[in-house]
């Protein structure tokens, strides 16, 4: 009986080890995890500017890092949300450094997403393959660019659990938000006496005559004090001076108006900001050409007769053919020829009777463009399998060499430019039916180009651990242990059976 007991205990230990190895959810063992905002020198504070220079109109730029300290396992995705004092501080961009070995997902596929608002910014990254999860003792999560716009001391703070979290491959929090230590960041902005900064927005975007327009100057600020006066010139003969940072106005006629805002601060320093407001519906531009390909010195028809103005009439057509020839006319139909082979950017601007304008552009290829074509191998690739693409089937019609191959891969929204016809790609997902689009565009030395697209059917392959899941494998392990114990009971020796009787 003692031998049986030892075997049972041993098997129980083995089963426990298997369960822990298979990550049955006994809770996380992570601890002392800290998400911190630090300077590029890894300090938790930063001073920008100096007391002898005014803060420039665009603010003083600086960059911070968001880092993870402490042990984390099975990290699949994360998001960090940061709050700041806007407009004293403004976020100008968030990014994940490519090729930086300190980046926590370095060498692995990830997707980034950003959300920048007035006073908040979010950035997240996620591995696309659960088998690629990582265990780390620290690393770089992201970089954020800011500008310091006002003299003083300010704090960058982490937002709550809806914005800041670490997730494992099950989509669960690695640690609850209140168990993650957060390291905020202190910014000191230095500067001499500075004029205010004027700025405003308006709504709605499309302004109509005799309809209320709201002007918001809350983005205006004073780097070393406060604004005491807002002076508005709406460009239609109406002016307004107020202490409020927002106002409304109605334009009685369609047209183009330069709205000028001047702000005055408590030191009697001033700054102005002008925006052009177009009231009414702009004309719509439609241009048709004769059928390509176009040859040198061949007359090409440019027909804009389908262009129209919803609330008036078009009075002017401004033609720019991209080869140095420009003409302004009332005609909506022109003929033009190009002397040399190449790629030209044609542009047409139309102006209506209210002074409103609109434009469109076309790429005109003179000569025969090269022909794009490619093959790929294997024909039915699996996820994470290297696929080879061969564009040697592309060729030039005119005696002009192909100089570049531009590949677009839909699965990663990635463009790759090469000078040779070969490229390799790895598809990390098979979630799209019937597959992912791959487009090749070939360019010759004159800039002429053409494209060729193929849908690549990507087949999913799932590891056994993903087919069954960790809980299923753990259950199988338990069943195996119980079965082994049952067998041991069945084959006990006659001596043991006699002792039990």
Image (cartoon, rainbow, N blue to C red):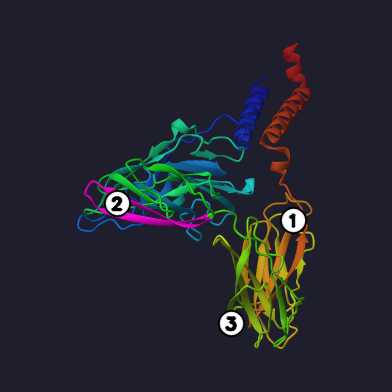
| Cβ atoms at labels 2 and 3 below 8 Å apart | no
Lateral position of residue 425 relative to residue 273, left or right? right
Query: Is residue 275 shown in magenta?
Result: yes
Q: Which residue is mark 1?
A: 382
Report the quarter where the C terminus lies: top right
Q: Earlier in the sequence, mark 2 or mark 3?
A: 2
Q: What label sits on residue 196 in the rendered view? A: 2
At which x and y percent is residue 9? 62, 25
Residue 485 vs residue 187, the one in the foreground: 187
Q: Earlier in the sequence, mark 1 or mark 2?
A: 2
Residue 253 vs residue 246, the one in the foreground: 253
Q: Relative to 234, does residue 501 appear above or below in the rendering?
A: above
At which x and y percent is residue 116? 48, 47
Q: What is the CA distance from the residue labelled 2 to the residue labelled 3? A: 44 Å
At which x and y percent is residue 412? 64, 57
Q: What label sits on residue 497 in the rendered view? A: none
Judged from this view, the residue extending furthest toward the left is 52
Q: Which residue is mark 3?
A: 325
Decide whether the magenta segment is chiefly helix, strand or loop: strand
Q: Earlier in the sequence, mark 3 or mark 1?
A: 3
Circle 3 crowding by C-alpha within 10 Å: few under 14, some 14–19, many from 20: few
Element marked by disc 1: loop
Magenta segment, which residues?
255-278
Lateral position of residue 230 relative to residue 66, left or right? left
């Amino acid at each position: 009986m003692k031998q049986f007991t030892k075997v049972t205990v041993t098997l129980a230990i083995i089963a426990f080890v298997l369960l822990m190895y298979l990550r049955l959810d006994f809770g996380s063992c992570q601890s002392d995890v800290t998400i911190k905002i630090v300077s590029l020198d890894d300090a938790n504070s930063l001073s920008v500017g100096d007391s002898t220079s005014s803060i420039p109109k665009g603010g003083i730029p600086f960059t911070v890092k968001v880092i993870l300290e402490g042990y984390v396992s099975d990290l699949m995705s994360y998001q960090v949300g940061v709050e700041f004092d806007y407009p004293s501080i403004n976020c100008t961009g968030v990014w994940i450094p490519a090729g930086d070995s300190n980046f926590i997902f370095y060498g692995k596929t990830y997707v980034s997403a950003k959300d920048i608002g007035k006073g908040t910014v979010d950035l997240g990254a996620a591995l696309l393959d659960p088998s690629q999860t990582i265990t780390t003792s620290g690393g770089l999560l992201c970089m954020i660019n800011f500008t310091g716009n006002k003299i003083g001391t300010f704090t960058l703070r982490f937002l709550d659990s809806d914005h800041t979290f670490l997730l494992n491959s099950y989509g669960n929090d690695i640690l609850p938000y209140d168990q993650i230590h957060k390291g905020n960041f202190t910014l000191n902005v230095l500067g001499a006496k500075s004029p205010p900064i004027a700025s405003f927005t308006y709504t709605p975007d499309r302004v109509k005559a005799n309809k209320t327009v709201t002007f918001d100057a809350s983005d205006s600020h004073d780097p070393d004090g406060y604004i005491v006066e807002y002076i508005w010139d709406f460009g239609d003969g109406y002016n307004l001076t107020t202490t409020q940072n927002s106002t409304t106005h109605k334009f009685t006629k369609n047209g183009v108006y330069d709205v000028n805002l001047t702000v005055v601060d408590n030191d009697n320093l001033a700054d102005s900001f002008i925006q052009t407001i177009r009231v009414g519906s702009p004309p719509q531009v439609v241009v048709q050409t004769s059928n390509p390909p176009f040859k040198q010195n061949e007359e090409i028809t440019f027909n804009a007769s389908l262009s129209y103005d919803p609330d008036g009439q078009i009075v002017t057509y401004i033609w720019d053919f991209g080869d140095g020839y420009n003409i302004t006319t009332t005609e909506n139909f022109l003929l033009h020829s190009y002397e040399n082979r190449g790629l030209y950017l044609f542009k047409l601007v139309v102006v209506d009777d209210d002074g409103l304008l609109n434009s469109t552009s076309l790429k005109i290829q003179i000569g025969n463009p090269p022909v794009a074509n490619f093959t790929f191998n294997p024909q039915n690739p699996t996820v994470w399998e290297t696929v080879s693409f061969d564009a040697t089937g592309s060729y030039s019609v005119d005696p002009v060499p192909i100089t570049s191959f531009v590949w677009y891969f839909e699965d990663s929204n990635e463009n790759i430019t090469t000078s040779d016809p070969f490229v390799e790609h790895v598809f990390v997902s098979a979630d799209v039916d019937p597959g992912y689009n791959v487009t090749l565009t070939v360019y010759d030395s004159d800039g002429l180009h053409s494209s060729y697209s193929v849908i690549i059917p990507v087949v999913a392959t799932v590891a056994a651990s993903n087919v069954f899941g960790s809980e299923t494998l753990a259950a199988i392990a338990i069943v195996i242990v119980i079965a082994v114990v049952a067998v041991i009971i069945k084959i006990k020796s006659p001596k043991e059976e006699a002792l039990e009787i």
